[in-house]
Amino acid sequence: MLGYLCLLLHLAGAYASASKGKTIILLAGQSNMSGRGGVQNNTWDGVVPLQSQPNPSILRLTANLTWVQARDPLHKDIDVQATCGLGPGMAFANRVLQRDPNLGPLGLVPCAVGGPMGTKISQWGRGGVLYRQLLRRAMVARRGGGLIRGVLWFQGESDTVSEVDARMYKRRLVNLFANLRADLGSPLLPIVHVAITSGQGPYVETVRKAQLGIKLRKVRCVDAKGLPLLQDNLHLSTPAQVRLGRMLADAFLIH
């Protein structure tokens, strides 16, 4: 029993120490960012590919604002109104550390919310609940030391239902990025966002055009088109999430 307690204390100390000098990455958006890979009939199959396996150098900020070793589902206590499965975060983090070990340890801050109905970008506006939660978690993440080095954003499927939302998407996304950079005091904070491959409505190409057309410094877009989907034709499969995570990592490392 004493040995077990010593082990727990050692691990707690290791996580506390690691959190002080970490590279912090914010994960935001809706269900494909929070992860539905391997989810069928509201049940996750528990399959974690090699590229997404836990790594002692990858931490996760929990819903109660403590650091723990990261493992999928990363958003299980954040996107609580839906069943979370595998997302792109762990494959991203493992790929980053594989290519540049000096960036470790990595602190992932899950903030994506899809829920049962998805979230539109208008719900992520400054002052709204989702934006406030994102900002609060970001502030807490860097409080103990470490630097916010990037944002991963994957959202837009819910904005394909209404033509008005689809046409407003580019302006709203640019505003979101500008507000987040301003509120975090980092005007050139690197952002990697995803051009959607699916949607809940007929205006997928309108939203994709908006996403692919954004030209801002230190903002890169990764195109998810062609990645395999689940049977719902909306959410990325587990292999697709792994591929996307590695694509996000490669784009992030260009900054």
Image: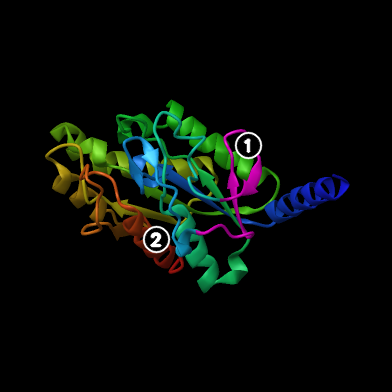
Q: Nearer the viewer, residue 38 or 160?
A: 38
Q: Badge 2: few (under 14), some or many (20 or more) residues near its Cα, within 10 Å?
A: many
Which quadrant is the N terminus positioned in? Answer: top right
Colouring style: rainbow
Q: Position of residue 14 (x, y in %)?
A: 75, 54
Question: Do tag 2 and tag 1 residues touch (Cβ < 8 Å)?
Answer: no
The stretch of residues the image draws in magenta is: 53-70
What is the chief secondary structure element of the magenta stretch?
Answer: loop
Q: Residue furthest front?
A: 1
Task: Residue 15: give its label.
Answer: none
* Secondary structure category for the residue under label 2: helix
Query: Residue, x 62% and y 44% (percent of image)?
Result: 141
Indicate whether residue 58 is drawn in magenta.
Answer: yes
Q: Which mark is residue 248?
A: 2
Residue at which label 1 appears: 65
Residue at image point 27% right, 57% down: 224
Which quadrant of the view contains residue 215? Answer: bottom left
Image-based side of 14 in relation to 117, left or right: right
Q: Position of residue 157 (x, y in %)?
A: 25, 41
